[in-house]
Amino acid sequence: MRTMRIGTVALVIIMACAIATAEPTLNAASGCVQLPNAEVAKAGGINVAVNFINSTGVNELSQLGFKAACQGNGFNARATVGFGSSLEVGLGYLGVFKEIGTANALTVGAKYKFYEDPGNALSFAIGATYRDWDADMSVDEMYSFIDFNLPTVTSAYIAMDKTFGVPADCEYTTVVTLGLMFDHYAAAQQTIGYRPIYQTTRAFAVDEGGKVESAEFFSPFIAFKTTNGNWSLKGEYKPELRKDHFTFSSDVWSIAVSKRVTPNLTATLGLTNFNLPYSDSNAGLFFGLSAALGK
């Protein structure tokens, strides 16, 4: 697994350094910042992106009796490749460096645009992503310790794009995305030493042995992108995923400004609460570059 991860890192970073117009999200699908839209990479084209992200918040596993701050920085490199006029495949790698240790993840995804009506500026797509986390994070206290493990996360979604304003006729063009997402969090066993660390009589997503149960969620999401010339403003929102007094994912939100520096290179600066699973996340600054290669 480690050899595969190193190979993935090398592949994505080499592509990104080759220095986009369907920009890859932080989850390796064309879209806004974290959330997808109904756009796909152009046929024969490769869109690559690298972002540096500051993240803050509190690890929900602190409820087990340990203070697990979730401040840190990370990088996210990914690429999407277009096949035909309706299909894209995405690949990504991210590394996160926290006060309590490090985590990295491999992300793979695919999206298919199954309907497009140019006359009404309307399109629909379905897609899925899979993220495999590998964590090396721990907290040691006087009489106990915990080694944190993170879940694999599988998501499937449907997204609809509606465009308002035609570039030839309007100074501003806005694309609004509405979608529905299914998220599955696999169970993740935490390694706990020396003493029982919590007691509860309420329904709780973690059992007495420290195993976080698996969970499934359906949630809507919304995003927009307004473009004027080489400048774009974009934002997004998706509700919190919480079960049995435990947050599997904070609500997702981002706001960002993008500038097309050249016809194929775009720079983005903004705020997002991108973070690890099991985190109650706050906003952090991020900066990124995306580039369109090939056709």
Image (cartoon, rainbow, N blue to C red):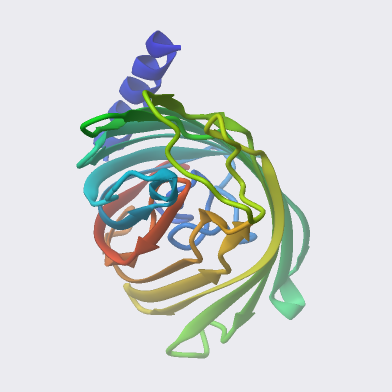
Location of residue 167 in the rendering, given as x and y in whole percent from the top left corner = 50, 81
For residue 105, which quarter of the picture?
top left
Total marks shown come to 0
Location of residue 233 in the rendering, given as x and y in whole percent from the top left corner = 38, 77
Confirm whether residue 263 shows in the render.
yes
Outermost residue toward the top in this view = 3
Q: Is residue 123 left or right of 45 when viewed as pictured?
A: right
Location of residue 196 in the rendering, given as x and y in whole percent from the top left corner = 45, 33
Q: Residue at x 29, y 27 (%)?
A: 14
Residue in the foreground of this view, choosing between 206 and 257: 206
For residue 120, which quarter of the picture?
bottom right
Residue in the foreground of this view, choosing between 214 and 104: 214
For residue 88, which quarter of the picture?
top right
Residue in the foreground of this view, choosing between 280 and 125: 280
Q: Residue at x 34, y 16 (%)?
A: 6
Residue in the foreground of this view, choosing between 54 and 289: 54
Q: Is residue 163 above or below residue 75?
A: below
Q: Residue at x 31, y 29 (%)?
A: 144
Confirm whether residue 87 shows in the render.
no
Location of residue 205 in the rendering, given as x and y in whole percent from the top left corner = 61, 47
Q: Is residue 10 above or below residue 92?
A: above
Outermost residue toward the bottom in this view = 170
Q: Is residue 51 left or right of 61 when viewed as pictured?
A: left
Q: Is residue 9 left or right of 173 when viewed as pictured?
A: left
